[in-house]
Image: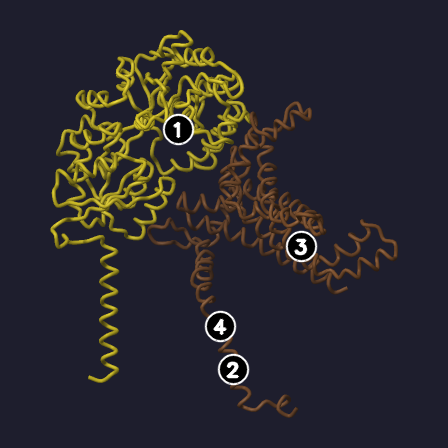
Amino acid sequence: MAQATAPGPARVRRSRRAILVGWSFILPNFLGFALFTLVPMAAAFALAFLDWDSYGTPEWVGLENFEQLIGDENFHVALRNTLYYAAGHIPLTLVAALALAIVLNRKLRGVNFFRTAAFFPYITSLVAVAAVWNMLFNPTAGPVNQVLEALGVAEPPRWTASTDWAMPAVIVTSVWRDMGYYMVLYLAGLQTIPREYYEAARVDGAGAWQRFWNITLPCLRPTTFFVLVMLTIQSFKVLDLIVVMTDGGPGRSTLVLAQLVYREGITEGRFGYSSAIALVLFVIVLTVTVAQFRLNERRNTP
Amino acid sequence: MTTSTRHLTKGLAATAALALALTACGSGGGEPAADGTTTLTVTVWNLAKTPEFKALFDAFQKANPGVKIQPVDILADDYPEKVTTMLAGGDKTDVITMKNVTDYSRYSSRGQLADLTDLVKSADTSKLAGLDAFDVSGKYFALPYRQDFWLLYYNKKLFDEAGTEYPDGLTWDEYAELAKKLTKGEGSEKVYGTYHHTWRSVVQAVSAAQTGGDQLGGDYAFFTDQYTMAVGLQQAGAAIDFGTATSQKSDYRTMFETAKTAMMPMGTWYISGILEAKAGGATDVEWGLAPMPQRPGATEVTTFGSPTAFAVNNRAEHADLARKFVQFAASQAGAEAITKVGVVPALQSPEITEAYFALDGMPTDELSKKAFEPDKVVLEMPVSEHTSDVDTILNEEHQLIMVGDKTAAEGIQSMNDRVKSEVLD
């Protein structure tokens, strides 16, 4: 006991050594992270306050890039579209993943097959997914519209060929693609709920809906929180699917922030301005995520 | 010698060897190699699918024994970004291919290309089409070797079946009428009268060329007639609608080669593609070339096009040889080499045209030959510091008009407003 309350020099040396050993374990990974993520990120932050065209000497311009951002219509459009995408993609994927997980959590014949099938879109090449959905959404000959017409819809939406429906089409595709992945997370969460809860609830005469509402959902809260955070980050960063499916079109109806970053930086060579947009995107994602963490903490401490 | 110094010497030797290996990689063989060959490096795109490069390289190597050309192959879609990065990073590749004039103006204004004005002045360049596009206040930093321009491809069989004369000297109104007449069938059997690819140039560059309008000017009223025609054809079902074409990522080659369309305005680069497809047995389409339709009252044939050129990197390792290559590509010998694979050379002469039409599989009728000699070829998109920004806006508004989200008048209004407020101010 005396040792624990008043550590001797030998103990200090030993703990320092433990720390060093610990560091040495994460060092290889951390080196890579620092070199390829941390340094470029810091450089990108610095670039946001410079004017640089990838050639010539960067010039310090202070907040000029951000001033330009406020008046840039492309930025407004892209910001609005990104929020629209997030507002559609986050809740829909969450609900679809949860529903799938609950359905596939039963002891059904061939449940493994269906679980695999639901996960399949996630591991399929994104370019293939986008190309196939583009064909499904074909305004004149696409199966989606043929079904809608058969159901009596006189003028079905023109999907990716219309400014109003292009974003919903992209959201539907992305929900379909991502729900399998989050379903797996939810399945894992469902396994952790003790079966006794359900048995007790049944004895007390609770219906299926009540069991879901009072047992399943609260017990899944840590999973839901994790899924929500991941989905939020993913939604704000969306780029690949949109580039392949609509390339921001028609017009600017599906132009998102990450795409604007690419366009201004890589295509137009305005790296300072592009970094400023990236910085704004980073701040948005950070704020939303921090807010989610705070909310979660408050709920966990009644 | 102690153990530690021996270690040190070993270490130094290893470092030196490594450094040597690295320099060897970076230079691509700076000095003539042991066997006396010099390696010239050239940036190219999609080497396997762009036969002109190989044709030119083979011809140059044959004419210059002891020279070996090493292509630096880059994916076509990434070409501008990749070359920009290479040049910014001080890359020493000798010859840089200028895929378009916009990028050329960027590189030359940054001083990344060597001055070739003396090459231009020393030779007779009056027959080198597209050279003017590379004039930067009296100086030239690249020499064109290839000049593509737009004309009208048509399917002879579909014309014969409809009992219609081949499309000679059409106005746009006549063209639209003809397209409606040639449209037939329903569903998957449908044959369209014409096919307008989704690029904005199909509507915009052609009206700029034929009306004399300026695509960088900020006033786009001159697009009106062409949009009215293009949207009208779509609504009449005589051309596949824009939304369908984009959502199925329509390939203009497939449209024409599977006889899904009777006519198609397209660039001359497609000639080599169609020759190859026919030679390979992929299609049996009977095709011909006609001049681009004109505005009413036009006295000569005006179309648009864009040249492709070679330039010498300012940091080139073999600057003299690189200059020699650029000159060769723009010369009679270079033109003959690429003519053989069906590519239209920048150097124009009756002999070259004759050799071109003597190619296996080329149509030999008079109309096709006439189509091949337009009176005036206007540069597809003028070059300035605003080109790329204006291009983005014009493309976005083009999509909105073509999908029917905006009328032509609304779209043009918003082009005017946006180009003025976002770019020119």
Q: Which residue is mark 3?
A: A187
Camera-side mark, 3 or 4: 3
Q: Dots 1 and 4: beta carbons under 8 Å?
A: no
What's under tag 4, amino acid-wise? Answer: Phe
Q: Dots 1 and 3: beta carbons under 8 Å?
A: no
Disc 1 from disc 4: Cα separation? 60 Å
Residue at image location 51% in from the left, 86% down from the top:
A13
What's under tag 2, amino acid-wise? Answer: Arg
Chain identity of mark 3: A
Under circle 3, the secondary element is helix
Q: Earlier in the sequence, mark 4 or mark 2?
A: 2
Camera-side mark, 4 or 2: 4
- The 10 Å Cα crowd at callout 4, few under 14, some 14 to 19, many 20 or more, is few
Measured as percent of width and height from the top left, residue B310 is found at: 24, 38
Tag shown at residue A25: 4
Residue at image location 13% in from the left, 32% down from the top:
B123
Under circle 1, the secondary element is loop
Under circle 4, the secondary element is helix
Q: Earlier in the sequence, mark 3 or mark 4?
A: 4
Measured as percent of width and height from the top left, residue B410 is found at: 53, 25
